[in-house]
Image (cartoon, rainbow, N blue to C red):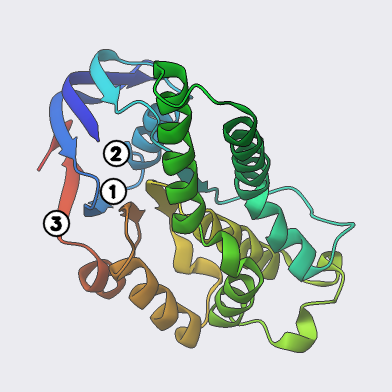
Amino acid sequence: MINIGNLTLSFGGKVLFEDVTLFIDKKDKLGLVGRNGAGKSSLFKLILGDHSAEGDLSIQPGTTIGHLKQELGTLKGRSIFEEAKTAFEEIAKLEKHIEYINQQLVERTDYETEGYLNLCDDLAHAEERFALLGGDQREKNIGQILKGLGFSEKDFDKEISEFSGGWQMRVELAKILLKRPDLILLDEPTNHLDMDSIQWLEKFLKNYHGAVILISHDRQFLDTITNRTVEISNRKFY
């Protein structure tokens, strides 16, 4: 899914890592460790396209990425539940797209043409993605994930601005998990979680269908979820 080859990254006149190679498969659970300033967060920025570097970094076309930032702006104007529901923008677009294709298929009679068959393929892919994202279960999934991250049902209708930054960060994490991207990038996700929420998140990520890359000082959290660990040290990946 992601292939890094002979990559060198410099930032602020300092070489963070050089001539490194790394392959991330579509179901990898990868821990990323190293001292402060080693380049862990910078690697995230490279993957997100926010930094450039010398060498090769290729991402499979169509790969969706969810990234939990360590800082976020103040959220307001929506309830906890309504804010979490914004994660389903892709599902809303898919619904409209599926409706459009079905209408086209009803109106057309050129059943053997390439155009008609392409529409059928497009419909199959859209419906598969809709099912993967939990399109028919969205409200149920919102409730499950918000509860898993420590919210109670009585919190769902409360204005999000009533909650502290740490709790708002939990909502942002919920939105990423609800979107079900191909790759999730998490930088110290346990900073704002209690023990029950950490244990719930461990189980969720361990069984997640896609790839996950974690930066965390919590080695037990990393060891529970990941199948391999990369340490950035002395400008190299180990």
Q: CA distance from mark 3 to mark 1?
A: 18 Å
Residue carrying label 1: 35
Which quadrant holds the C terminus? Answer: top left
State yes or no: discs 3 and 1 in contact (Cβ < 8 Å). Answer: no
Above-or-below relation of 5 to 185: above
Crowding near the residue tagged with mark 1, few <14, some 14–19, many ≥20 C-alpha atoms within 10 Å: few
Which residue ends up furthest to the right in the rendered image?
A: 77
Above-or-below relation of 153 to 131: below
Q: Is 129 displayed left or right of 83 in the figure?
A: left
* Residue 234 seen: no
Crowding near the residue tagged with mark 3, few <14, some 14–19, many ≥20 C-alpha atoms within 10 Å: few
Above-or-below relation of 159 to 175: below
Q: Is 83 displayed left or right of 214 in the figure?
A: right
Residue occupying the point 38% across, 46% down: 182
Return the x and y of residue 111 as percentages of the image width and height. 45, 27
* Residue 182 seen: yes
Return the x and y of residue 39 as percentages of the image width and height. 32, 36
